[in-house]
Image: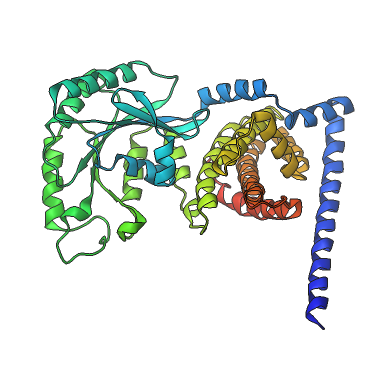
Amino acid sequence: MSESDGNDSQKSDKFALINQWKERVSSAWKDNTGRLKKLMPLERVAETTVKWFSVSDEQVAEILATVQAKLPTTEALLIGKPQAGKSSIVRGLTGVSEAIIGQGFRPHTQHTERYAYPSEELPLLIFTDTVGLGDGDRDTQTIIEELETELQHKHGDRARILILTVKINDFATNTLKQIAQELRQQYADIPCLLAVTCLHEVYPAHVEDHPVYPPDYAEVTRAFTAIKSAFEGLCDRAVLIDFTLEADAYNPVFYGLETFRDNLADLLPEAESRAIYQLLDENASEKLGNLYRDAARRYILAFSTIAATLAAVPLPFATMPVLTALQVSLVGLLGKLYGQTLTPSQAGGIVSAIAGGFLAQAVGRELIKFIPGFGSVIAASWAAAYTWSLGEGACVYFGDLMGGKKPDSQQIQAVMQEAFKSAQERFKNINK
């Protein structure tokens, strides 16, 4: 058989699979529509399904505002000198590149900047970074006043935590101690985590890479003990970390991340703790060999976590408009990453265009919620997996546009199917 015959055969097989898939979707749609007809009039079926993918800009804004109030959001106030590892902590917890984080920080007050992840509209993590922290009494007092003002304005039920960063070879910590003392006196209920950073700067001369964690070097132990002693009574936990860049050639790049995560999670309420663990899922941190997809996947993970959290409401169909608004917001954010600025309406159009046959599955999964004590967990897992697959499909869509190509709907559907299967496994225990 010639090579051309082989290619024709492969194409034929692909078309056959696509046709089979279309038939399955059509069958599932008919079956689910029939089930729906028994529960509501046909007119309401059509009206409801159309509305899922037809959310106005005003509705999106209203839904996202409501969702934001319910999110398990953690506000982390990063307090430390420049180059003490604050931005590295943001990289470690979000997985987002240094360049994107740098673009994401916005001036907040005279001496603070703020970064919300994955977005301002739907933040799971909000980082407030102190800048210009020096030894001058005037600047120090201004920083304290700004942080106290910030802590006075509590936003809903958001969890808050202070993270102090100190380089392991920096013993000029009087300014940081003064700030910590005054804040802890006023807000003793807010937990405080001391992160001692840049460990490799005191490694013995012959050491070229990180040892097994924790590092068992006299230089590290001695310095860590001294710093902990200096901050005794001011912090609830202390942890050693060394978050470097890949160019620094230390392995792993985020040395001590698991210990940092565990200590951070222990100091947070249960919902926020679960969100932290999900965001640091190691399966989502795999290298993709593509800058855009690697960055995009971090945002997809965050939105999938949000989707699962909100989809666990045991009320059939109640979460579909919310999930649509989340996905519209996700696609808009991914579009921005790929250089496409979209209105919510435009993003909604893309969601509708690339979602394809998943709508039929959405109907079926929502109906599972009628089974008491069983359906909502499945729906939450499904919502996370669907959001993940939609994000992956959007990356293919925007990637084609960036490359000057017309998006291939069949390729997008294939990517979404594969992504959905793998994401189902990843998120199957998300609510446990």
Q: Residue at x 68, y 27 (%)?
A: 318
Is 222 on the left or on the right of 365, as rendered?
Answer: left
- Residue drawn where x is 84% and y is 67% of the image: 12
Position of residue 49 measured from the top left corner of the image (x, y, whole percent): 79, 32
Q: Is residue 223 left or right of residue 424?
A: left
**Of 139 and 154, which appears nearest the observer?**
139
Residue sitting at the far bottom: 1
Vertical placement of residue 91 versus 3, above or below: above
Q: Is residue 314 visible?
A: no
**x, y percentage for residue 156?**
45, 19
Applied colour scheme: rainbow
**Quarter-of-image position of residue 326:** top right
Point out the image quarter for the N terminus. Answer: bottom right
Which is nearer the eye, 378 or 93? 93
For this view, does 192 lie left or right of residue 313? left
Left or right of 345? Residue 155 is left
- At 53% from the left edge and 28% from the top edge, which residue is drawn? 121
Write the residue at 58% across / 31% down: 310
**Count of labels shown?**
0
Find residue 53 and report its horizontal and vertical position in percent: 74, 32
The x, y position of residue 192, in whole percent, is 27, 32
Question: In the picture shown, does residue 112 fall above or below 424?
Answer: above
Q: Quadrant of residue 251?
A: bottom left
